[in-house]
Amino acid sequence: MVKRTLCAVAATICLVALAAQPALAAPAATAATSAATPANAARVAVGAILADYDGALFHMTRTSSACPNDGTRSNQGGSCWWWAANAFMALISYAEKHPHSADLGKIRTDLSDTYSNVCGGDCPAGKNSTGNDPFIVNTNGNVYYDDIGWWEQAWLNAYKWTHNKRYLYLAEQLWSYVTAHGWRNGCNGGVIQDTKAGATKDAFANALYLRNSAWLYSITGETRFMTGRGGKGGAFADATFIRARLIFAYSGTPGDSGAQFTIADHLSGCTATGSNSWLQSQGEMINAWTDMYAAEKTYCQKHHCTVAAAYYNRLADALARTVISDKLVVKKNGARTWRFKGKKGQARPTVDTHGILSEPCDAAVSDWPYGCKLGNSAGTYQSYLISKGIFERALSCSNHNLRDSKLTAFASANAASIARLPHFGFLWDSPNANKPVIFATQVSVLDGLNAAMTGSYAMC
């Protein structure tokens, strides 16, 4: 049985309501509209996500559409903290693509309320604030650097959309905090996954750190985001670490045309390891390399260095193509195979027989992806499996540079399948009940729908 040995996103702390009050369940999102189009389905998903919001923070209840309760703390779900950050990413992307939507005002208000509540009076008043971890709620147990990275990314996207500098200052403070406390120089550098003793370096934390570092440089032009601070961190150093330590190469050399590879889950010592190529970490690495392409090109124009930025474009494209090419094939004799079967880190394919994105999750091969073991009760969901929409989000951004017709066609096919779903649950091509249908699956679905729509993206 394939098992994830380390999970960078487990046991994190949920956003909780500031005052006890009865929680009303939002209706489970479905695409039962007059026409099953991605645009109509996206409107339904947005409405369901916003309905799970209590005006200050996201609901943490045991209802089908809200975040699951982890059973260890009153009304605190184990993954809702970073799920909420990704909800804002999906909502902002929708807002950019639908500038006349009636939902824009609520999205802006919810962003502002969240900003005020998650860091209280500790939000930075200006640039270059270092300080402590700004999220006061983190004193309740959040020790994961990837969770901080998800929120840093969300505040950068919020700044790009609203031009409100308080969001940018908070993102800068989060970057400084991770650089000072999460960076380790051994094994070519890199960010550890959490503050616990013996923490390893993983794909989640480093994909986010690279993406956020490159994005901050592109926004501010400040060299510290590329070269680091106090001998630690920076986009250049983290990109070197990822290339040297976190890649499973299947064929060719990563960065060369036609190479095939995925990102390892984490290090064991200084060696890449991990049981599966989880789609959200693959997607976030595509985002990171896409932003590194833009940041390095600008940096070298200013500092007269050799521009190798196209290399990061090739990495992003090759990783995306590797993932979408790993399709389950059922032969005439009933045997099931896929392109990277038996390869390092690839115990299941990533695309089902219908050409729809799925997770390389724990399940009997004969029942994959329908038998993915997500848990049977609230709080036991394997949260890193649910957010595969992050991969689709990455396809949209990389295609701003690449114009890769294969990626465009894949995103369109997935969005069309999502739009026909009777329930916005974990699977994207299931006509059945498709459980679980929760807050995070609806966010993932919205990412998948956004990816196939034309229009602007603040985050790209």
Image (tube, rainbow, N blue to C red):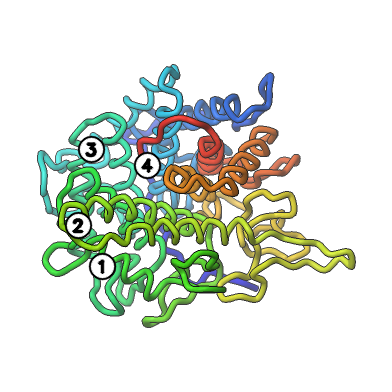
Q: Mark number for residue 167?
A: 3
Q: Nearer the viewer, mark 3 or mark 1?
A: 1
Element marked by disc 3: helix
Measured Cα–Cα span from mark 2 to mark 4:
24 Å
Q: Say which residue label 4 marks.
A: 460
Residue 454, above or below 360: above
Element marked by disc 4: loop
**59 displayed left or right of 305:** right
Q: Locate the N terminus and report the quarter of the image it occupies.
A: bottom right
Q: Say which residue label 1 marks.
A: 237
Taking the image as drawn, is residue 92 in sight? yes
Taking the image as drawn, is residue 135 in sight? no
Q: State the residue at coordinates (66%, 55%).
A: 351
Task: Count residues near mark 4 (Cα–Cα under 10 Å), then give few for <14, some for 14-19, many for 20+.
Answer: many
Q: In this rendered view, identify the residue nearer to me: 269 or 256.
A: 256
Measured Cα–Cα span from mark 3 to mark 1:
25 Å
Answer whether labels 2 and 4 touch (C-beta < 8 Å). Answer: no
Q: Nearer the viewer, mark 1 or mark 2?
A: 1
Answer whether labels 3 and 4 touch (C-beta < 8 Å). Answer: no
Q: State the residue at coordinates (21%, 52%).
A: 301
Q: State the residue at coordinates (23%, 59%).
A: 178
Residue 323, above or below 115: below
Q: Mark number for residue 177?
A: 2
Disc nearer the start of the sequence (2/4): 2
The extreme right residue here reads 333
Disc nearer the start of the sequence (4/1): 1
Element marked by disc 1: helix
